[in-house]
Amino acid sequence: MSQRNSVTLGRILDVLAGIVLDVLAGIPDRTQLVRRFAVFDPTATDELEPGTLLLCPGFDTVPELLSLRAVLLDRGVHTVVIRDGGSLPGDTVNAFAGDDLAVLVLSPSISWTRAIHLLQTLLGTESVERDRTPSGVSVGGDLFAFADSVSALVDAPITIEDTEFRILAFSSRHGTVDQARITSVLDRKVPSEYVAMLGSRGVVQHLQRSSESVWIPPDGAESDLARVAVAIHSGGRYLGSLWAAVQSPLESERDSAFKAAAKMLAIHLLQRQLHNDAERRLNEWRMVSLLRGEQPESPTTWPKPTPRSFVVFALGMRQSPGDPESPAGSSLDELSDSLAVHLAALHPCSVAARIGDTVYAVLPTRAVDTEAERYACIVATDYLQRTQARSGVVIGVGRAVTRLPDLPRAREDADRARGVLQTARGAQRVATFGDVYIDYALQTLAHDAHAMGVHPLGPVRNLLEAGSQYVDTLLEWLESFGDVNRASAALHVHPNTFRYRLRRVREMLDVDLDDPDVRFRLLVQLRIARASDSWPTVVGQD
């Protein structure tokens, strides 16, 4: 079986250990690259290749196992999977493994077909499933049927949720429901207020660490019914949770059935997560190819009308040291998914993917030049408004290019605009590089000065240390062209107070403020200070 990408054996064990595979004998080399998997065929051992994960269904006799060892080592195969290690003597299995082979055992509850399907997804050998929600999250169609089965089992309405408390599926039986369930089902996400309540009660922490069910009394606001929840784990990894809306705690038998259902769900959610990972890897590959100027598809594949230009988006988060809302990787993945859906409605060949701390997107358009850039800014602004993305999200827009090989230059523009917006103190959240070119030039001046061992702010440093009132005084005086009355009114201080501060400024700077070249340099240095972290945040007092 061929595959697009190789993964390490450690990655396979991290994902599948504990629920699909376990180590039976030997010490797996977690750094080993698994390039393919194959089902053992005794008539085709010469086709085995180094880096193969070998599946051995029905292989459970001592002679067969021992005769296989030399063949595997000769072909460079170091990891095998068998079904039932319990039917083989332990010393035989250990002798077979030795120092060269690792023997993994397939869980009794997992079929070989299911194991092969999971490995196909993990190795990227199977197409990504097409059953997807509007947010871009894949959902197995049988999850709703599964929710109905669990609902009948515990006699309560059921929801299946991911780690972000998004609703993946819910039972068709609603029975007696409360507003919290109605809102969750309609929005496909648990209300943020209810999630905050769960966090304050320690429920979220419990789900992340334990496989035991937890009882949540009604909160008296939107939740009139109590809840019972149990986490869905696979190999120590938290995948989501199973919820039931109940009038009273589940008795022992139903609680055991509820927890058993969560264990069965682990396979479904693991498969879903692997599918999402595979699609993100594919999108990232496509995005990297495009931003390098390569063309993954032939121009003849573009739907009519063919695009006349391409625009690059670079989405990032404002830099706020100590901000608890600074995004984790999952938040950027959500932004990537939602941006991909938003752009797909405008052009089916648009693509979006997260690369590091930035979400990039390429939008084909029929417009060209500045018209295309204006259109892209409107699209980006509309996306931020529609998704109600928090204020820290900013989008830099690159120049419109007419050829795919020119996309790297467009990406540079988008990255520069994003970088300026991330450090800016204003409310602007979308900009082209042309919009913020001067700000970028000021940042470049500051970086070049540091590189040459020169402080970029010069004498302005003395004002920054003295307090913001002196910085504001100088800046307002320069921007008011020396008009004291206008400048003092803008700062809401008496003209005499302003004149006093201006005298102090002259003393601290020790420069000739009557020289126009000096005034120009000071204004540039103040702009650099405002564009950097050097701008004072504490107002001093005289």
Image (cartoon, rainbow, N blue to C red):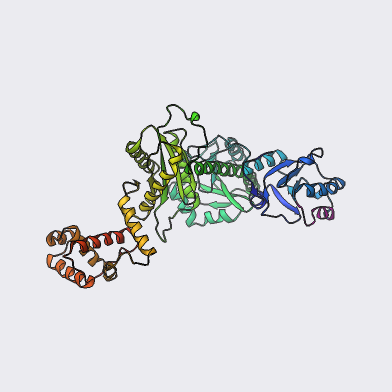
In front here: 242 or 326?
326
In front here: 401 or 244?
401
Picture quarter with the N terminus: top right
Asked if residue 343 lies in the magenta stretch, the reply is no
In front here: 301 or 421?
301
Identify the residue at horizontal 35%, vertical 35% (top origin): 368
> Looking at the picture, how far across and down is residue 300, in whole percent?
49, 28
Identify the residue at horizontal 47%, vertical 57% (top origin): 200
Picture quarter with the C terminus: bottom left
> Looking at the picture, how far across and down is residue 287, in whole percent?
49, 42
**Magenta residues, start to end:** 91-102
> Looking at the picture, how far across and down is residue 327, in whole percent?
45, 53
Identify the residue at horizontal 42%, vertical 61% (top origin): 322
Q: How many marks?
A: 0
Residue 43 in view, yes or no: yes
In the rendered image, the residue lying farthest to the top is 304
Tell me which corner region of the image, top left, top right, bottom left or bottom right, holds residue 459.
Answer: bottom left
> Looking at the picture, how far across and down is residue 430, in whole percent?
35, 46
Residue 491 in view, yes or no: no
Tell me which corner region of the image, top left, top right, bottom left or bottom right, holds residue 131.
Answer: top right
